[in-house]
């Protein structure tokens, strides 16, 4: 599953809010190595390996 979201906070990873999914907020997610540092409010692309919101990785910013 691929979703677009917004970085909502930075903790031990990046928490992302998904507007298309009733603004659900992810647990802290890691980024792919090429993404670099993100800031709160940035739009990101997240890929999930299952339907579990905790299984995602941020693969890009837009």
Image: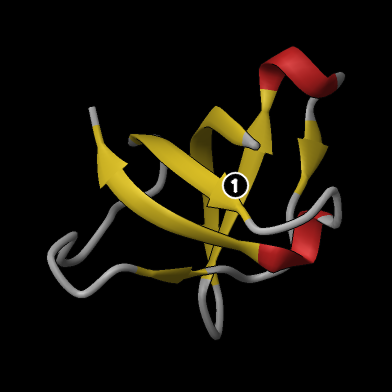
What residue is at 51 percent from the left and 76 percent from the top?
13
Q: Is mark 1 on a helix, strand or loop?
A: strand
Q: Residue furthest bottom?
A: 12
* Res 38 quadrant in image: bottom left
| Crowd tier of the residue under label 1, counting other residues whose Cα lies within 10 Å: few below 14, some 14–19, many 20 or above | many
Position of residue 50 in the picture relative to residue 44 (left or right): right
What residue is at 87 percent from the left and 19 percent from the top?
22
Quarter of the image that includes the C terminus:
top left
Colouring chosen for the image of the structure: secondary structure
* Res 50 quadrant in image: bottom right
How far across and down, in percent of the image, does residue 53 sit? Answer: 79, 54
Q: In this figure, what is the number of numbered marks?
A: 1
Position of residue 55 in the picture relative to residue 14 (left or right): right
What residue is at 27 percent from the left and 45 percent from the top?
60
Residue 55, above or below 3: below
Instruction: In this rendered view, identify the residue nearer to me: 43 or 40.
Output: 43
Residue 22, above or below 31: above
What residue is at 20 percent from the left and 75 percent from the top?
33
How far across and down, in percent of the image, does residue 55 sit? Answer: 71, 66
Residue matched to label 1: 16
How far across and down, in percent of the image, does residue 16 sit? Answer: 60, 47
Position of residue 61 in the picture relative to residue 25 (left or right): left
Quarter of the image that includes the N terminus:
top right
Residue 13, above or below 44: below
């Amino acid at each position: 599953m691929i979703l677009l979201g917004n970085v909502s906070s930075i903790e031990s990873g990046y928490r992302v809010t998904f507007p298309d999914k009733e603004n659900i907020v992810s647990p802290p997610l890691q980024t792919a190595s090429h993404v670099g540092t993100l800031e709160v409010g940035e739009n990101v692309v997240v890929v999930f390996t299952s339907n579990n919101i905790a299984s995602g990785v941020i693969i890009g910013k837009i």
